[in-house]
Every structure is written in structure tokens, then in C-alpha cells.
Image: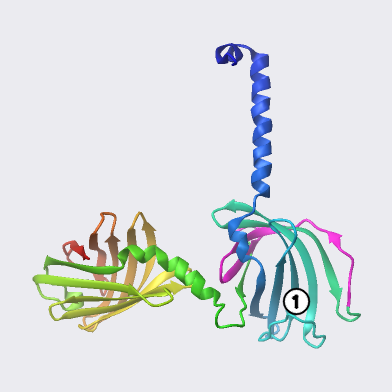
Amino acid sequence: MFNLDKILKSPLQLILLTSLFSANSICLGDDHEKAKIKHAEHIPGIWKRTWISPNGIPVSMTKVIKADKEDNHFIETITTSEEGAKIITKLDKDQVKSKWEVLFKVEPVTGNMLKFKAIKNRGYNVKDSKWNDWKEVNFQYLLQVDEFYWNEVMQDLENSTKRRFSRVTTSLEDQPYRKLAKRKLSVLKPMLGTWEGSVEQVEIKAYGIPAHTQNIKHVLSLNEDETIMVGKWQSQNFDVFVAKSYNSTKGSIVKNYHTSSGVQMSGELISSSDKKFLWERRGDTPNGFLYEKCLIDLSEEGVFKHQIIDRTLDGVAQPEEPVIILKRVE
């Protein structure tokens, strides 16, 4: 056993102890860097992006990426073509403008953000149908990848080149969007089931609802592959039908709903934490354009709280309405 008091009083021993811990920290850091990164499992596959060149010609870039022998290391074969609608996985001299390969590794940054670090690359001589020699390189950029999208950001955020690739699939069984949508939509699973309750409702001009005691039944369920959540909100002479899904372009969960009083709304989940979900909604009503935020609070077990915030009708602030509290029905 060592005496900590003596060590703290001795500058030399304190320096030696600090060095020992620093060395151990470095070793642990190296081990962490070499560990297999879980979300890097999405990297292998075929990725494509298409854009219009300044000459007005459709151009496509295709990445074919395979895992290398070492963890977190990959080889990508990149091909560009002026045939924007085609997926280039095999060489066609009439279509291919350029082709090259890059050996790279990825390192974690934060969350699911990765750092792409090129190690070496080589170009392909399309005219002679020959690969050039490998050359060491040192370029890097930030990368986010999931089941469906490959997003890369080069340079700084203000002046960056941002590029998005979509995964290419050829079979009905392998649909990456479905995997992504199911994972994203799973955050709403606490809402599933049947909820019932009542509220002393005030008049709601936007929805055409008079003041009355409103008895409510709310039912939410998922489709078979869990990529769409559908629901009904029923009360006396007032019905709502809603569908929620993941919008891959926006990168957020969206919903659309229709009411029996002629309201058609679209919404987006703008924040969620600890079973609390804040929606921003807007749409048309027989009485004008409606905007509002809706907070769904499920933080209390078996309780569904519905609160409207910042409601306006044609830009005019609307009276507050009571918080609706429903209880789960088993």
C-alpha cells in the first residue's frame, strides 16, 4: 500500500504518479480508437448521388464500398458518369468520366458523426483500362451514415461542400429506408394503444368546436413493418384521422391529419425528450390558416397529456384551451 499523504507532499513522487496515469490514459485512448465503431456497419454498400452540371448535363457519382481487413477500414471505388440515371458498378468507357479508389478509415467524433481519413488512393486510366499505382494521401472530412443516407461535409461549415448519397438496393427484401424509418419512428412507441378521458372544452373557432364536455377516445397503432403510425381521435361529432412517418429528406418525423370539421394539417416533430414530444403544426381550416404547437407529455406512466401552445388563426392569437388528460385503457 502507498501513503497518498506522503506522495502529495513529495513533488518528485507526485510527478511520477501523474506520468504513470497519463501513460495509462494514452494507452486507453489508443484502445478506444481501435475499437470497432458500431454505426460504421452502415458504410459498406453502393451509394449514389446525381446532380446537374453547370453545362446542364445530369452527372452521377457512385461509391462502391467494401470493408477492409482491419476494423473501421474500408476501400471505396468511385465512378463519375454523365449518364445520371445509371448506377455505375462496372466499367463502361462510353459512360465513365473518371474512376478511382480510396483506402480510408473512420474515427468517432460525436454522436453518429465520423471522421473520414484517407490513407492512400489510386486512379484508373479509362483510356488504357489500367489502374495507376497507389499513392499515400492525407485528406479528411466529416461523415454521417445510416441505413439510407451518406452525408459528407468538407472544409468548414460556412464554406463547406455538402454532399448526400443514397443507398442503392436491387431487391424488395432489402429496403434500407424501411429500416431507417422503423428505427426513427420507434421514439413514438410510448404513444401506442388506446387512451380515454374527458375535458371541459372551451370554444375552439379554428376547429369548429363549441364549448362542451368533450369525451375523447384516442387510438394509435403501427402498420405491419412499423414504418407508419396511424391514429384516430374521436369525440362527440368530431373525428380526427392522423398518419405519422419519417421524412428522410427533412430528417424528422412528420404527420398529416384531417378532421371531420374540415381542417387539414401537417406537422413536424421539432423536439423530444423524456417521453415529451413537441409538434409544430400548420394548415387550412374553414375559418382561415391555422398555426400551433402541440406538446404531448407521456412522462407519467399511463397518462397522456395534450397541450396546445402559441395557436394563431390567420395570424391572430387564439384563446388558451385546457390541457387534455387521457388515461391508458388496457
What span is in magenta? 130-158
Residue 51 horizontal/vertical position (percent): 64, 79
The quarter of the displayed image where residue 284 is located: bottom left
Query: Disc 1 residue type?
Result: Thr
Residue shown at 16% from the left, 62% from the top: 322
Residue shown at 59% from the left, 82% from the top: 171
- Is residue 66 placed above or below 70 in the rendered structure? below
- Label 1 neighbour load within 10 Å: few <14, some 14-19, many 20+: many
Residue 277 horizontal/vertical position (percent): 33, 61
Residue 287 horizontal/vertical position (percent): 21, 81
User: Furthest-bottom residue in view?
Assistant: 94
The quarter of the displayed image where residue 326 is located: bottom left
Residue located beneath label 1 in the image: 79
Residue shown at 46% from the left, 66% from the top: 183
User: Furthest-left residue in view?
Assistant: 212
The quarter of the displayed image where residue 281 is located: bottom left
Left or right? Give the position of 47 relative to 195.
right
Left or right? Give the position of 70 relative to 203.
right
Which element is circle 1 on? Answer: strand
User: Furthest-right residue in view?
Assistant: 128
- Is residue 35 placed above or below 259 in the rendered structure? above
